[in-house]
Image (spheres, helix red, strand yellow):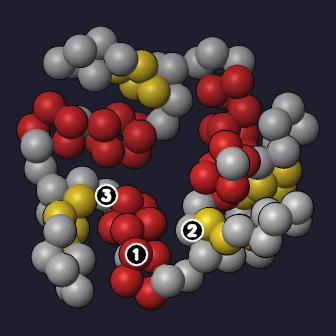
Amino acid sequence: ERPFACPQCGRCFSSRPNLIAHAKAHAGARPFACEQCGRGFSRKSHLARHQAVHTGTRPHACAQCGKRFSSKTNLARHQAVHTGHRPYICTQCGKSFSRKTHLLRH
């Protein structure tokens, strides 16, 4: 359950601290900077995830096909390929998508 909604973009969060951290990004606050490229992030965890871009580290492997990912989130998204899970359905044509962004782009 994600009862905390951002008034600016509508994104929902499971806790108030996560919503507050998200709201800081809207305000432009990015206090965590990458030492390699200078890109700023609103959360320390986002900086850590980004650093895999520079190191090439991909510690999360798909149990089905062995493909490796830099984050658990990307691995979980990939697994829809194997499960066929496509929960986002176009109300106009019925086509289904594994990601909300793909539905919105459609």
From the image, tell me which residue sits under label 1: 81
Instruction: Give the mark nearest the N terminus, 3 or 2.
Output: 3
Asked whether the viewer can see residue 18, the reply is no
Above or below 76: residue 13: above
Q: Observer-nearest residue: 39 or 18?
A: 39
* Circle 2/circle 1 CB separation < 8 Å: yes
Instruction: Give the mark nearest the N terminus, 2 or 1.
Output: 1
Q: Is mark 2 on a helix, strand or loop?
A: loop
Residue 74, given in percent of the width and then of the height, sits at 37, 60
Q: Inspect the image, locate mark 2, and give the three-letter code of the amino acid beneath it.
A: Ser
Q: Observer-nearest residue: 101 or 9?
A: 101
From the image, tell me which residue sits under label 3: 71
Marks 3 and 2, Cα distance to the nearest angstrom? 18 Å
Q: What element carries label 1?
A: helix
Residue at 66% of width from left, 38% of height from top?
22
Q: Inspect the image, locate mark 1, and give the three-letter code of the amino acid beneath it.
A: Val
Which quadrant of the figure has residue 10? top right
Above or below 96: residue 19: above
Q: Residue 98 carries which label?
A: 2
